[in-house]
């Protein structure tokens, strides 16, 4: 087990979560207590849990609307964090691994998140459409787009939380983006001046014509 201390809650946490901060604190405490043991986070993550994971996800909350799918939800990053921050949005957390699904369902119940459903499935097998599809730290765009674009309604959005290499990923994914009718591609940098580490977000539309 890691002996690294849990990162102190940054002042920006209360700013981002508002009156939902207590729920965010409960989720963060649970992830800190059980995350490494249950294989959800690595041993070095406690010392940056708020900064790198919780707030990195929460900063994107204003971008979402309607019905959202989080593909490869894992520990609940970003899906559970976003569901806490945006109780007015309906979230479907898609995760194929049983032990992670168990964790997600436990947290949904413990936190009273009535705006969340958890599906044990691969994205390719879901067969539903959403207003927005999101993912964080799942894979590069050229492999992520083919499994996420089919989940978006016509003119629906893809909003992915990415790293500093997102521009290179976009360049490498041009053929895939065209094949899946992904248009209006942009990159937004969120949290500058607010967070210790800003968040890069890939945004695009899926013009499927369905």
Image (cartoon, rainbow, N blue to C red):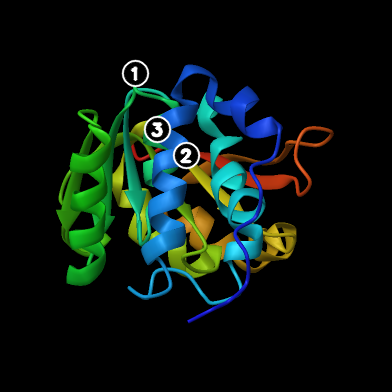
Q: Nearer the viewer, mark 3 or mark 1?
A: 3
Mark 2 and mark 3: span between their CA atoms? 5 Å
Vertical relation: 130 (above or below) 121: above
Residue at 53 percent across and 26 percent down: it is: 17
Q: What is the x, y in percent for residue 66?
A: 33, 23
Kindly indicate whether the residue at mark 3 contacts the one at mark 2 (C-beta within 8 angstroms). yes
Residue at 36 percent across and 54 percent down: it is: 148
Q: What is the x, y in percent for residue 117?
A: 18, 41
- In this rendering, would 129 be left or right of 21? left
Kindly indicate whether the residue at mark 2 contacts the one at mark 1 (C-beta within 8 angstroms). no
Q: To which residue does mark 1 refer?
A: 88
Closer to us: 168 or 84: 84
Q: What is the x, y in percent for residue 166?
A: 68, 58
Mark 1 and mark 2: span between their CA atoms? 19 Å
- Occupied quadrant, residue 49: bottom right
Q: To which residue does mark 2 refer?
A: 25
Mark 1: give few (<14), some (14-19) or many (20+) Cα within 10 Å.
few
Mark 1 or mark 2: which comes first in sequence?
A: 2
Vertical relation: 115 (above or below) 76: above
Instruction: State whether residue 33 appears in this view.
Output: yes
Q: What is the x, y in percent for residue 21?
A: 49, 28
The secondary element bearing badge 1 is classed as loop
Going by the picture, which residue comes out furthest to the right?
Answer: 193
Query: In the rendered view of the protein, which quadrant contains the C terminus?
Result: top left
Badge count: 3
Q: To which residue does mark 3 refer?
A: 23
Mark 2: give few (<14), some (14-19) or many (20+) Cα within 10 Å.
some
Closer to us: 204 or 16: 16
Residue at 34 percent across and 24 percent down: it is: 89
- In this rendering, would 6 be left or right of 90? right
Vertical relation: 148 (above or below) 55: below
């Amino acid at each position: 087990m890691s002996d690294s201390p849990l990162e102190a809650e940054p002042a920006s946490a209360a700013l981002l979560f508002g009156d939902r901060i207590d729920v965010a604190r409960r989720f963060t405490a649970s992830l800190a207590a059980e995350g490494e043991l249950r294989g959800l986070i690595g041993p070095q993550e406690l010392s940056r849990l708020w900064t790198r994971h919780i707030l990195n996800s929460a900063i994107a909350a204003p971008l979402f609307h309607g019905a959202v799918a989080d593909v490869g939800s894992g520990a609940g990053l970003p899906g559970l964090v976003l569901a806490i921050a945006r109780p007015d949005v309906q979230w479907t957390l898609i995760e194929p691994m049983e032990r992670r699904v168990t964790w997600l369902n436990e947290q949904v119940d413990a936190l009273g998140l009535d705006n969340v459903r958890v599906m044990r499935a691969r994205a390719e097998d879901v067969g539903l459409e959403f207003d927005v599809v999101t993912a964080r730290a799942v894979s590069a765009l050229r492999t992520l787009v083919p499994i996420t674009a089919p989940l978006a309604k016509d003119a629906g959005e893809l909003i992915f939380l990415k790293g500093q290499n997102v521009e290179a990923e976009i360049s490498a994914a041009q053929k895939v983006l065209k094949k899946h009718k992904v248009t209006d591609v942009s990159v937004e940098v969120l949290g500058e001046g607010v967070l210790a580490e800003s968040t890069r977000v890939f945004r695009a539309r899926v013009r499927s014509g369905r």
